[in-house]
Image (cartoon, rainbow, N blue to C red):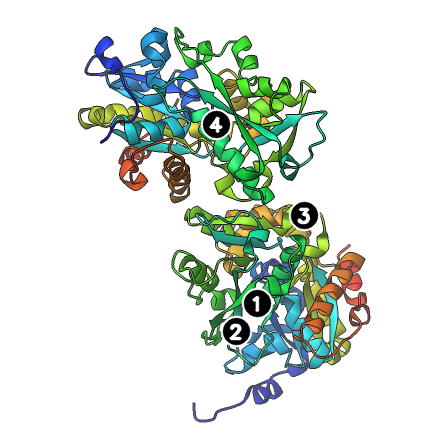
Amino acid sequence: MTTRLPTVRTSKRVKIGAREAYYTICPVFVASHIAVEFGWLEEEFIRIGAKLSYLRGLDPSVGWLPHFNHTLDHLFRDGGNIPSISARADVTDTLLIGLTAGHHGGSILVRQNADIHRVADLAGKKFGLYRSLNKYKVDWWRATGHRGLDLALNLAGLSKRDIQVVDIETQEQAVGGARRPSELWSDSRRAEIAFTPEVKALAEGKVDAVYTSEGRALRLQRTGAFKVIEDFSRYPDWTLQVANSPYAITVNADFVQKNRDIIVAFLRATVRAGHWANANRDAAASILARVTYYPTIEDIATAIRHVDFVPNLSPLNLAAVDVQKAFLVQEGYIQNDFAVADWADASFLEEAHAMPNLHVAA
Amino acid sequence: MGVVTSLADDLKNATPLRELLYTICPVLVASNVALELGWIDDELKRVGATATYLRSLNDPAAWKWHYDHGSDRLIRDGGNSPAIWARADLQDTILLGLTQAQPGGKVIVRARDPIYRVADLKGRRFGIYRSQQSGKIDHRRATTEHGILAVLALHGLWRDDIEWVDITEGDAHNEHPARTPAGIWSQIEYEPEVRTIEARALLEGRIDAIYDYSIGTAELLERTGKFKIIDDLDLYPDWTLRIANAPRTISVSRAFAEQNRDVIVAYLRAAVRAGRWINANPAAAAAIFHRTTIYPDEAAIAKALRQYDLEANLSAQNLAGLAVEKDFLLQRGYIENDFDVRAWADASYLDEAVHSLR
């Protein structure tokens, strides 16, 4: 495998025991967050004599980058699929063991007072795209915005030639030092995440429009300064809802070989949390509010109404990963193509579903 | 069997006047549930009549009466285009009730094609069903044609902006006779994985888009990961966009109805009761409809049922909707003779059924 991303094997600097694993989860609507918050993940690990720690409990100098490029041994990652695809394509060998469909493809945002009411009105205007100056990770937020822009133009019958793309370059700050995801997301960080650099450029009049995610769009519109002129969730086309999603659960391939029970334990807790979230959506919203960045619990309850939280490897979710990967290949975000079908291994999920649930009686 | 008797002979030898033939389309109409719950048999028994399923008859031509109303003692509940065809060009019938319980159609393309809007289909190939069966109105083609024209118009396109590609089927209707409709539908063989011949043609690249008006089939196709829905008539506020083979019609042979009014009222009593039961119990009704329709997914049926009123009526809006479809069928040559939809309807039977239930 040709490695595109310059990598540092973080593992060399972190001593990890044979029955020890790390996990990291993006601030998105996935059941593993609930499995963590309820202690179900820890419970499953203790039961089989294994240990699980949060990646971002490590010092940011070693714990931040592996969230994006999987460069830590024994790592479980659940969340946005662009870093997962990038890691598998260009960095390290992983297995895809579960997927959760995203529910919303994102929005196109302009200033509230702009005389812009539809994407067609953006002809001749400036569109701000985030650009990370960090060379050690895939620029997943740019890629998400880039695809959102392409789709919006397609839906409006325009092309890139009709607008001017303005790169908003950014030095990213490493984060870490949290015992679990809910500690990482302080209220101030949660409020700040909507104001991405390209949104600030929009507010300052340097660009006329940007792409944003649903949770950010909700928060930004409530400031009164912005409005949404395109919302992909209004269309029935599922390929428009592919936006760093479906969310992927991945794990290092070499760890799997000797620790099958640990992989199944992780999924058992996640499947259990998924069933619970499907059955208790309002309660799930209040848990997920601690680990995501939507403005309110009510917003989350509305957003997750139709989410299936039980991870799967359905043909539709796998096809959606393939749609995302094809874009990343086509636009040069990843260098090496691979077959999604070869990456996915459903046997762990099947085993997690098959094992009797020890908690049913409780 | 030494003597071959025709159906007409059979009917003469029976107690003909009190024997009602019925036929029901595999769609969301209360008659299907009324039948499965035994309420049609019960109600007819109370007036000394019996109900016999059209396709239980051992007459190889009987199936055609479902379309042309070719029996003089037939009640029919289902898609409106055969009922309109029969009324316009063939038989004297009475319109007894209407049910609008049908989602709008969807435009489906291959998931990986760079097609994001109906406007992108300009110059491309749209599949349309064609039956090779000459003995009936091609209701599936008519429904598809009406839907495609509606969706094109929404995007500023017209008939000649796309290439129409016939997806042809023998449409033999050679199922074995069955006691009830569910016994006929259980004999239907579907295309593996994609269910319909139109979706097969799309998957194989013979066409670029299809229009699907089933319940649950579009979602089934999505779940393969190979198809996507780029438009859905339910997303628009205009209710006339959803008019095609629905509102469903309950129609009956006029002379029989006039001579056996109590039998028809009894049938409608069962249908009204069933309609109310479905409205109150959509999930339970979905299990019954899963047997009595050709829809693939019980959950999708339950979801659809929650949107609609399954109690038949002759509301002004439904009558206006029926006139929209009649005009379409006339304009496109599916029927030859115009008629007045309001004059076709006689609300007195349904009124009597509803009042007698109070």
Which circle, 3 or 4, is nearer the viewer? Answer: 3
Image quadrant for the C terminus of chain A? top left
User: B95 and A158: which one is in front?
Assistant: A158
Element at label 2 = strand
Under mark 1, the amino acid is Arg
Give coordinates of residue B274: x percent, y percent. Answer: 65, 56
Under mark 3, the amino acid is Tyr
Which circle, 2 or 4, is nearer the viewer? Answer: 2
* Residue, disc 3: B236
Mark pair 1, 3: CA separation: 23 Å
Q: Quadrant of residue B151?
A: bottom right
For marks 1 and 2 on the same chain, the one whose residue lies earlier in the sequence: 2
Q: Is residue B193 above or below residue A211?
A: below
Element at label 4 = helix
Q: Is residue A67 above or below residue A98?
A: above
The answer for which chain carries disc 2 is B
Under mark 4, the amino acid is Ala
Under mark 2, the amino acid is Ser
Classed neighbour count for the residue bearing mark 3: other residues with Cα under 10 Å, few (<14), some (14–19), many (≥20):
few
Q: Are marks 4 and 1 on the same chain?
A: no
